[in-house]
Amino acid sequence: MIPEPVRQSLRGRSFAETRSAILDLIRSSGEITRVDLARRSGLTEATISKVVTDLMASELISASGRAQSTGGKPATFLRLDTSRLGAIGIVLDLPHVVIVLCAIDGSVVDLATIPATRDEEPEVVLKRIAAAIGGLLDVNGTTPDRVIGIGIALSGRRSYRGPNPLDWWENMPIDEHLRALTGIDVLLENDANCAALHEFWSGGIPAGQDFAVVYAADGIGAGIVINGDVYRGRSSHAGEIGHVYVDRNETPCWCGRRGCLEVTGTPQAVARRARDMPELFSDLGVDANGSTRAIYAALAERASVGEPREFELITEAAEYVATAVVGMANTLDLGLVILAGPGFAGAGEIYLEAVRGALETTYIRSVHQVEVRLRSVHPNIAALGAASLVLHRRLTPHHMA
Ligand SMILES: [Zn+2]
């Protein structure tokens, strides 16, 4: 059997890299003593002591509680300091914009929701967002200089540095505009990668554990975390599982091929299929012009209580998702797959069961366990992830090296 790879030693790194890696070890541990930091990093206690002093002076960590000691001076636990600094995450989840203020452990301090539609001028909406950020900081007794940055989660797959972040704001550099309005640094990322970074940053996942988050909203995408950072590929389209072949009926897809997950297994695709079944559709009690989300929510609710036609529709979609996940788990040798996002609300258990079942009989399962977790299905998860993006990029930049 091939042994698990040994992660690179921290010895011989620059002080900045060491500081970044130690902060990350404190993050993933929740709380940890100096002695354990030295043991787990392979660094001397003198080096740890120097880094810890620096992190405390920067108000990034604090000491709390006392660890059990086998004699001598009791050791203190170190943890992220959630009292001073924070990050802001935004999701443009029209017709609403959700803005969250998070502490540096990624937990929510406060949030604001403001209305915005596709018909409005982007400048007007951005000014409203900037004003809401100002209000959120005031109410919580904090100031822009204590905000490490603003992250924006964009739906769909597009370059996180690209010029076209949102179709309704074509050629609008959202990051530059919002930076000018707030004086705070702004980062952009797609929603699936944000969801993956939220799981990583707040879920206590260590940098050595590679995993993928399957994020469902109206569509489905995956955020893949390898060696403590999101894997983006050549053009930030890694994790685009929407165009994986899953359907033997060969439903045509707008991408030019047939049988894609995008047109068979996404909430959007399920809602479309329900529209083509008049009897079922009328039982849903949804307006004929209802949104994809409203139709899918009604379907999921009925499927979860065992209504047979609805259950069959969602189960079919869940099996398509499972097929795509199996391919990804085998290709990437994953030990952990997380399902998250509002598209799993209501019928998440059906997806969980389908994905677990499919992985049970696949190649990689003969080598090792593949854990599958169903996590937050709340619509705000992408906004929390956008704040985690800021924390991850700015506080532990060694992952990006
Ligand atoms: Zn396609």
Image (cartoon, helix red, strand yellow):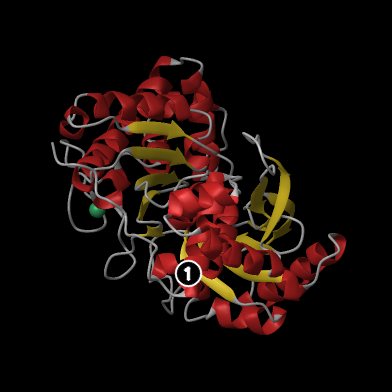
- Quadrant of the frame with the N terminus: top left
Q: Quadrant of residue 31?
A: top right
Which of the pair 288/179 is nearer the observer?
Answer: 179
What residue is shown at x 48% (from left), y 54% (from top)?
A: 197
- Quadrant of the frame with the C terminus: bottom left
Q: Is residue 349 above or below residue 101?
A: above
Disc 1: CA contacts within 10 A as few (<14), some (14-19) or many (>=20): some
Which of the pair 269/391 is nearer the observer?
Answer: 391
Q: Quadrant of residue 353?
A: top left
The number of numbered badges drawn on the structure is: 1
Residue 115 picture location, percent across and down: 70, 59
Report the side of 241 relative to 63 (left or right).
Answer: left
The residue that disc 1 covers is 397
Residue 143 picture location, percent across and down: 80, 71
Q: Is residue 6 above or below residue 8?
A: above
Which amino acid lies under the numbered mark 1 shown in the image of this protein? Pro
Residue 172 picture location, percent across and down: 52, 80
What residue is shown at x 59% (from left), y 60% (from top)?
A: 387
Report the side of 238 relative to 147 (left or right).
Answer: left
Q: Is residue 339 visible?
A: yes
Report the side of 109 relative to 349 (left or right).
Answer: right
Residue most toward the left? 1
Residue 176 picture location, percent across and down: 57, 83
